[in-house]
C-alpha cells in the first residue's frame, strides 16, 4: 500500500526554504564536496559517458544518479534554432526568439553595460529554452578584414574585447546558464580551419591573442571554454598542452570545463592528457544515429584505463570540472530561474545595442540627420529588404521578427513621405552588376529628395545550405575586400543620379570604398544590427537617435594595406604545400600597425561621428603608489544630447623591445546634454604599462617615460600627457 505522509505547513515552509537556499550561491568547497560524492558513486563507464557528446548538442548524463545530459546551444547573438538530437531543424517548436545585434556591433557600442545587458537577454532566453551552456561569446581577434566570422567576433584590440566580454559572460551566467568563451586560440582564419597550423611569437600570443580569454577566466569567471579547430605551434588547439594545461588551467587557474569545437578532437591520448574535458561534434559520416561510443573520448578511453594505459584520475578531473559547472548552474537540482522569452525588454535591449553600435562614418555637409520636411526617399539595395538572422553558419537565429531598414524607414517617415524601393543588385553566386537593376535604382534616386542605399556584405546566398555560406559566414573567408554583386557600379550610378545619397553598409567589417567614398556625403556602418536593426537605422537617419558607435577595428583603404596581408600571411602561404600560417604581423594587428607604420586608413580604430560636437580639456596625469590617475573634461558644445567615447592610449617612449605606437588601456563612454561638461577619471594599474618580454618569458614594466594620450579615435588624439614610471 502506498504510504501517504502528511506534511505540516511548517515543514512545507522549511522545504521551500531548503529549495530556495539550494538556489543561493554555494561556495566552491560545497560544490566540490557534492561533485566528489557523485564521482565516488560512478562507474568508469558512467564517467566516460559524460566526457563526450550524446547527440548533436548534448553530452552524456548519468540518469541513475539524477545527472541529466548537458544541453548546449549556439550562440553567440541569440539562442540557435532547435535541432532536436540531430542537425535537422525541428518543426513546430517555439524556437523563434530574440535576435541580438552580432558581436561586432556590440563591441562598437564601447559600452560594457550593454555587454552585460546583451548577456542577460541571451542567458534568460537560453534558460527558458532549457539550455545549460550558451556557446558564446566569440572573441577571436579580428586580425584580417577577410575573416568570415569577424561579424561574430568583437575587435582587433584585446582590451576592448576584455571589457565587453566580461560583461557578456556575467550577464549570461547571472541567469544561471554557463557561457562558453570561444575559440581558444588563434582561430583567426576560416579557410582550411580544420587543418591549418598557426605559428606566432610568444609576445603576440600573450599581448594580442590571449588577453580576452584571460579576462574571461579571471574577471568573468567563465564556466566553459571552447577549444578551436586549428593547430597552434604544431599541436591541435583543442588538446594543446601549452594552451590548455599550462596557461589556461595552471597559470590562470580556470576551474571550468574545456569543450572541444564540434569535431575538433583528433586523438584520444592527447585529449586525455592535454586538458580537453568534453568532446563534442556529431560526425555525420556515422549516419543518422551515430554511435557516440566510437568517439575519441568514448570506448577507447575505457579500454585505455582498463589496460592501464591511462590513469583514471585524468577522467575524474574532467568529470569533476563538468560537475562543477553543472552544480554552479543548478543543472542537477534544477533550481534555476525559468528565464523569459521574447519579452519587450529583450527586444528593447536589442534595439539599444543597435542604436549605440551603428557607426556614422562620414557626414559631409551635414546631410544627416534627414530633415522631417523630406517628401520622398528612394531606398535602394537588396540588404534594405533582406533578413539576416538565419545566415552565417552556427550563429544562425530564427528571429521572432526582423525589422529591415526599409520597414524601419517606412515606419518612421512622416505621413505622406513617398518611399520607393529598388533592389539595385542580386545576391547570387558570381553575380555581377545588373544594368537593369542599376538603371531602375538610378531612376528612383533621381526622382526622390534623398536616396538611401543599403548594401555591403551578406551571410551568403541560401541560408538553409551550409555550402552556400559566403562572405560573413562560418567556414569561409571573404575572397577580397571589394563590394560584391556589382555594388560599386550601383553606388556610383545612384550618386550621379542624386548626390544626396546616404550609404548604409551591413557587414562584419571593412569593405573597400575607394571608388565612391569621396563623392558619397554620408556613410553609416550598421554591421548586422539584429531584429530591431531597421528601427535603429531609421532612428539614426532621422536624428531621433544621435549615433554614438565607434569602430572596434580599423577600416583600411585597400586590402594590401592590411597588416595580415602586408606583413603576415592570410590564409596560408599559397606557394607552399604546408598548412602553416605565419603571423609575421606579430603585435602589429589593427591600429597597432597602421599607427606605427604610418599607413593612412580609410577610417581609424575608434572613429565614429555624432550629431553634436565635443571638446576635451584639463588633462592631468598623476602617478600614485599603485595606480596612475588620469583626469580630463569633455563638454558637449553642440545643440544635441549625445555620447562621446574617450579613449586612452599609452606609448612607451623608449623600451628594450619595440612596442607599438599606441595601445588602448582605458576608455569611457559619456552621455552629455547640450552644454554639459563632465570630468572623466580613468585609473591605470601597473599592467597598463607592461609588455611581455619573450626573452625572460614574463610581463615587465620598464621604468621610463610614457605618453598618455586621450583621443576620440586612435588617430584623433585630443590631449597628451606624460608619466614617469
Ligand atoms: C563552430 C562553433 C559552434 C559549433 C557548434 C562549430 O562549427 O565553430 O562556433 O559553436 O560549431 O555549432
Image: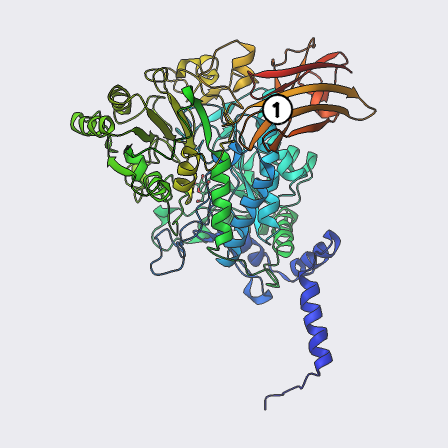
Q: Residue at x 39, y 49 (%)?
A: 399
* In the foreground, 417 or 303: 417
Pick the quarter of the image with the C terminus: top right
591 above or below 506? above
Expressed as whole percent of the image width and height from the top left, the position of residue 523 reads 40, 25
* In the foreground, 268 or 654: 654
Its colouring scheme is rainbow
Q: Is residue 245 left or right of residue 189?
A: right
Looking at the image, how many numbered discs can be counted on the residues?
1
Return the residue found at the far right.
625
Instruction: Check disc 1 and report its element: helix, strand or loop.
Output: strand
The residue identified by callout 1 is 647
Residue 265 visible in the shown view? no
Few, some or many residues within 10 Å of mark 1 (<14, 14–19, 20+) = many
Expressed as whole percent of the image width and height from the top left, the position of residue 409 reads 35, 39
Q: In terms of image quarters, where does ligand 1 lie?
A: top left
Expressed as whole percent of the image width and height from the top left, the position of residue 93 reads 38, 60
Q: Residue at x 46, y 15 (%)?
A: 601
Residue 164, quarter of picture: top right
Label 1 C-beta lies within 8 Å of the nearest ligand 1 atom: no
Q: Is residue 321 left or right of residue 394?
A: right
442 above or below 382? above
Amino acid at each position: 500500500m502506498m504510504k501517504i505522509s502528511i506534511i505540516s505547513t511548517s515543514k512545507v515552509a522549511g522545504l521551500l526554504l531548503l529549495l530556495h537556499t539550494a538556489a543561493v550561491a554555494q561556495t566552491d568547497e560545497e560544490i566540490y564536496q557534492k561533485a566528489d560524492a557523485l564521482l565516488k558513486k560512478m562507474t568508469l563507464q558512467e564517467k566516460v559517458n559524460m566526457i563526450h557528446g550524446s547527440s548533436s548538442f548534448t553530452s552524456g548524463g548519468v540518469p541513475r544518479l539524477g545527472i541529466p545530459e548537458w544541453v548546449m546551444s549556439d550562440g553567440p547573438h541569440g539562442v540557435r534554432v532547435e535541432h532536436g538530437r540531430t542537425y535537422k531543424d525541428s518543426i513546430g517548436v517555439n524556437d523563434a526568439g530574440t535576435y541580438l545585434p552580432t558581436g561586432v556591433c556590440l563591441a562598437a557600442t564601447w559600452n560594457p553595460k550593454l555587454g552585460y545587458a546583451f548577456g542577460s537577454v541571451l542567458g534568460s532566453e537560453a534558460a527558458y529554452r532549457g539550455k545549460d551552456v550558451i556557446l558564446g561569446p566569440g572573441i577571436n581577434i579580428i586580425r584580417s578584414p577577410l575573416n568570415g566570422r569577424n561579424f561574430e567576433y568583437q575587435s582587433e584590440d584585446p582590451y576592448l574585447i576584455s571589457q565587453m566580454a566580461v560583461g557578456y559572460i556575467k550577464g549570461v551566467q547571472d541567469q544561471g546558464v554557463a557561457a562558453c568563451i570561444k575559440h581558444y586560440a588563434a582561430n583567426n582564419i576560416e579557410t582550411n580551419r580544420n587543418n591549418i597550423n598557426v605559428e606566432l611569437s610568444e609576445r603576440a600570443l600573450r599581448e594580442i591573442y590571449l588577453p580576452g580569454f584571460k579576462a574571461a577566466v579571471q574577471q568573468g569567471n567563465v564556466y566553459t571554454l571552447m577549444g578551436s579547430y586549428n593547430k597552434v605551434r604544431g599541436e591541435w588547439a583543442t588538446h594543446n598542452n601549452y594552451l590548455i594545461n599550462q596557461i589556461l588551467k595552471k597559470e590562470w587557474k580556470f576551474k571550468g570545463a574545456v569543450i572541444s569545437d564540434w569535431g575538433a578532437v583528433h586523438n584520444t591520448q592527447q585529449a586525455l592528457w592535454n586538458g580537453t574535458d568534453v568532446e563534442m561534434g556529431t560526425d555525420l559520416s556515422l549516419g543518422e544515429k551515430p554511435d557516440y561510443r566510437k568517439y575519441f573520448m568514448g570506448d577507447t578511453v575505457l579500454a585505455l584505463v582498463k589496460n592501464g594505459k591511462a590513469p583514471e584520475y585524468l577522467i575524474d578531473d574532467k568529470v569533476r570540472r563538468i560537475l562543477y559547472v553543472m552544480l554552479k548552474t543548478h543543472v542537477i537540482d534544477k533550481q534555476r530561474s525559468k528565464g523569459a522569452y521574447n519579452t519587450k525588454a529583450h527586444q528593447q535591449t536589442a534595439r539599444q545595442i543597435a542604436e549605440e553600435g551603428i557607426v556614422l562614418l562620414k557626414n559631409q555637409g551635414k546631410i544627416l540627420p534627414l530633415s522631417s520636411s523630406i517628401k520622398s526617399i528612394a531606398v535602394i539595395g537588396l540588404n534594405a529588404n533582406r533578413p539576416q538572422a538565419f545566415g552565417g553558419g552556427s550563429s544562425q537565429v530564427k528571429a521572432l521578427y526582423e525589422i529591415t531598414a526599409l520597414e524601419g524607414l517606412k515606419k518612421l517617415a512622416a505621413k505622406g513621405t513617398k518611399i520607393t524601393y529598388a533592389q539595385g543588385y542580386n545576391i547570387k553566386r558570381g553575380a555581377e552588376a545588373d544594368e537593369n537593376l542599376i538603371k531602375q535604382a538610378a531612376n528612383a534616386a533621381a526622382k526622390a529628395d534623398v536616396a538611401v542605399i543599403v548594401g555591403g556584405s551578406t551571410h551568403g546566398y541560401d541560408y538553409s545550405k551550409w555550402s552556400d555560406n559566403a562572405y560573413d559566414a562560418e567556414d569561409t573567408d571573404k575572397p577580397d575586400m571589394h563590394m560584391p554583386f556589382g555594388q560599386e557600379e550601383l553606388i556610383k550610378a545612384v550618386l550621379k543620379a542624386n548626390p544626396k545619397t546616404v550609404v548604409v553598409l551591413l557587414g562584419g567589417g571593412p569593405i573597400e570604398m575607394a571608388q565612391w567614398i569621396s563623392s558619397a556625403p554620408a556613410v553609416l556602418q550598421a554591421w548586422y544590427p539584429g531584429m530591431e536593426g531597421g528601427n535603429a537605422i531609421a532612428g539614426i537617419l532621422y536624428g531621433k537617435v544621435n549615433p554614438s558607435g565607434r569602430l572596434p577595428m580599423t577600416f583600411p583603404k585597400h586590402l594590401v594595406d592590411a597588416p595580415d596581408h602586408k606583413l603576415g600571411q592570410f590564409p596560408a602561404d599559397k606557394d607552399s604545400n604546408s598548412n602553416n600560417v605565419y603571423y609575421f604581423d606579430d603585435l602589429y594587428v589593427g591600429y597597432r600597425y597602421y599607427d606605427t607604420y604610418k599607413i593612412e586608413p580609410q577610417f581609424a580604430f575608434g572613429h565614429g561621428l555624432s550629431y553634436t560636437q565635443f571638446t576635451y580639456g584639463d588633462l592631468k596625469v598623476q602617478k600614485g603608489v599603485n595606480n596612475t590617475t588620469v583626469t580630463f573634461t569633455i563638454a558637449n558644445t553642440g545643440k544635441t544630447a549625445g555620447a562621446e567615447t574617450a579613449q586612452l592610449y599609452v606609448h612607451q617612449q623608449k623600451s628594450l623591445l619595440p612596442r607599438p605606437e599606441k595601445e588602448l588601456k582605458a576608455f569611457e563612454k559619456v552621455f552629455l546634454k547640450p552644454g554639459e561638461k563632465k570630468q572623466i577619471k580613468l585609473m591605470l594599474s601597473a599592467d597598463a604599462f607592461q609588455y611581455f618580454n619573450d626573452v625572460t618569458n614574463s610581463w615587465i614594466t620598464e621604468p621610463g617615460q610614457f605618453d598618455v594620450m586621450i583621443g576620440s579615435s586612435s588617430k584623433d588624439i585630443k590631449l597628451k600627457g606624460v608619466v614617469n614610471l
